[in-house]
Amino acid sequence: LLEKYKLNDEYDEPIIIHLFYEFGFSCTDQLENLPAHKPLAIIIKYANHIYQDKNSSFQADEKLKLEITEYPSFDEYHKKFEKVYKHLIDGDCYQVNLTGPFYFKFKGVGDPLSFIHDLWNRTLSVGAYAHATYIDSLGKLYLSNSPECLFRIEKENRKLMAYTMPIKGTIKLEDESERESKWKELVASKKDQAELYMITDLLRNDLTKICLTPANVLDKKLPLFVPGLVHQFSRLSVELKDDTNLDQVVRALFPGGSITGAPKKRVMKIINEVEGYERGFYCGSTIVMHKGLKSASINIRSAVLDYTQGELFYGAGGGITLLSQAIQEFDESYAKMESFLHFLKVENVNKS
């Protein structure tokens, strides 16, 4: 199905493709790990579309209220960390992105459209690849405030180009006034630089696989600031052939290296053995094709709101290398969760 979408074509009505993380087992020839009776993708072809003024008078019916029901404990996380660390020591891999699930009960978002619109009005908090899809037949809202790009397709001087911008390396901001000092601290961190450079090299290889055209690293290390966090990312590009289709790009790049680790196929097996849950929408990618726009996110800072159960699922984690410390990585996952709650404007979360 993905083969029929040519990247040189334009699409008058939007096409949205949500690839769940587990679809990556197909892309990496690990069919034995595909989950039974679980969705791997959702493809939506819209019959029409309406542009909505961001400043129109939508109001959320009431504020979002959350009650946390399940979350990673440090003991639980530490056991998984130790298993990952042994794989690193044994030379099975160089980096593993270890994540964990957070589950909440939610109230106060009866109308998904108003809720989404209210979020998008907060321009300073919205990520560059933020998106949301509500599917009423499933009763689910797929919501992402992602700052990360899996790929973006551009036409430049009659050339078809693909760009990717992996994020790797994070420091928590206690106050926005710390931006400059924390960025200097992140730049000086050999551990975070190693994380980024490993994944940059992996992405350079993945981009090259699309058309066997050598990819280029345009920027090795750039800052990205989001509420409560400072990240670092790199930027890469590759020239594509005119007849390149979506399937070629997806099979080369998905799932994104920043949410797997390196080498990708081996660490996906390790993740499957260690984490003990299905990531699903989280750590998958959402592809948007409309007119000349063809881009894909990496679904970090992402949640699924299940209206049939009143449950919200959120995942968070980070890259583990030989220089990683369990408590620091555990705290980083909570900092990312707190950043997402800040975006949702949830001030207090009640624990059951």
Image (cartoon, helix red, strand yellow):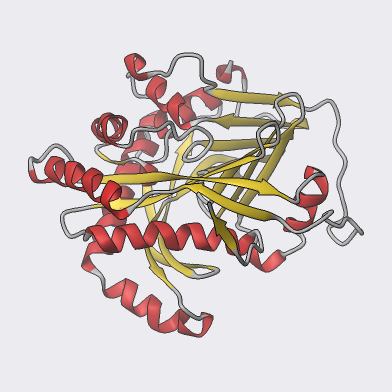
Residue farthest to the front, as pictured = 352
Residue farthest to the right, as pictured = 57
Q: Residue at x 66, y 64 (%)?
A: 345
Task: Please say if 134 is above or below 340.
Answer: above
Task: Please say if 12 is above or below 118.
Answer: above
Which one is nearer the viewer's eye here, 32 or 256? 32
Is 106 positioned to the left or the right of 232 in the image? right
Which one is nearer the viewer's eye here, 301 or 196? 301
Q: Position of residue 313 (x, y in %)?
A: 55, 42
Which one is nearer the viewer's eye here, 269 or 313? 313
Q: Residue at x 57, y 20 (%)?
A: 2
Task: Please say if 66 is above or below 49.
Answer: below
Which one is nearer the viewer's eye here, 208 or 23? 23
Q: Residue at x 24, y 50 (%)?
A: 78
Q: Is any part of residue 169 visible from this angle?
A: no
Q: Residue at x 42, y 66 (%)?
A: 222
Q: Quadrant of residue 63?
A: bottom right
Quadrant containing the N terminus in the rendered view: top right
Count of marks, rendered view: 0
Task: Please say if 15 is above or below 352.
Answer: above
Q: Position of residue 156 (x, y in %)?
A: 59, 47
Q: Position of residue 75 (x, y in %)?
A: 26, 51
